[in-house]
Amino acid sequence: MEENRLKGILINIWPMIYRILNSILYFIIGLIKTVLSIAFRQLKQGG
């Protein structure tokens, strides 16, 4: 009985959790790309 209620809650909030995780992932990937491009430019100038 408890498990069913928990599943119901999870199903209701899953889209929200998914959106949050998605935006966090998107942000991290964007950050990594930015850092890599800056590092690449620095290497090109340094070399």
Image (spheres, rainbow, N blue to C red):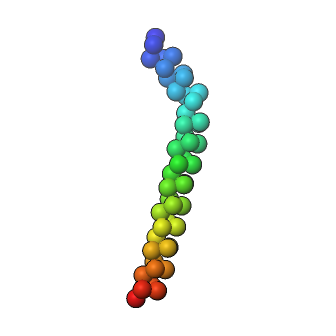
- Please tell me which residue is depicted at 49% across the width and 23% down the height of the picture: 7
Instruction: Give the image quarter of residue 40.
Output: bottom left
Q: Position of residue 31 (x, y in %)?
A: 51, 61
Instruction: Give the image quarter of residue 43.
Output: bottom left
Q: Nearer the viewer, residue 2 or 34?
A: 34
Q: Position of residue 2 (x, y in %)?
A: 45, 13
- Please tell me which residue is depicted at 56% across the width and 42% down the height of the picture: 20
Q: Is residue 33 above or below residue 5?
A: below
| Quadrant where the image shows the C terminus | bottom left
- Please tell me which residue is depicted at 46% across the width and 70% down the height of the picture: 36
Residue that protrudes farthest toward the front in the picture: 46
- Please tell me which residue is depicted at 46% across the width and 80% down the height of the picture: 42
Q: Is residue 13 above or below residue 21?
A: above
Q: Position of residue 19 (x, y in %)?
A: 58, 42
Q: Position of residue 30 (x, y in %)?
A: 54, 61
Number of labels in the image equals: 0
Q: Is residue 12 above or below residue 35?
A: above
Residue that protrudes farthest toward the left in the picture: 47
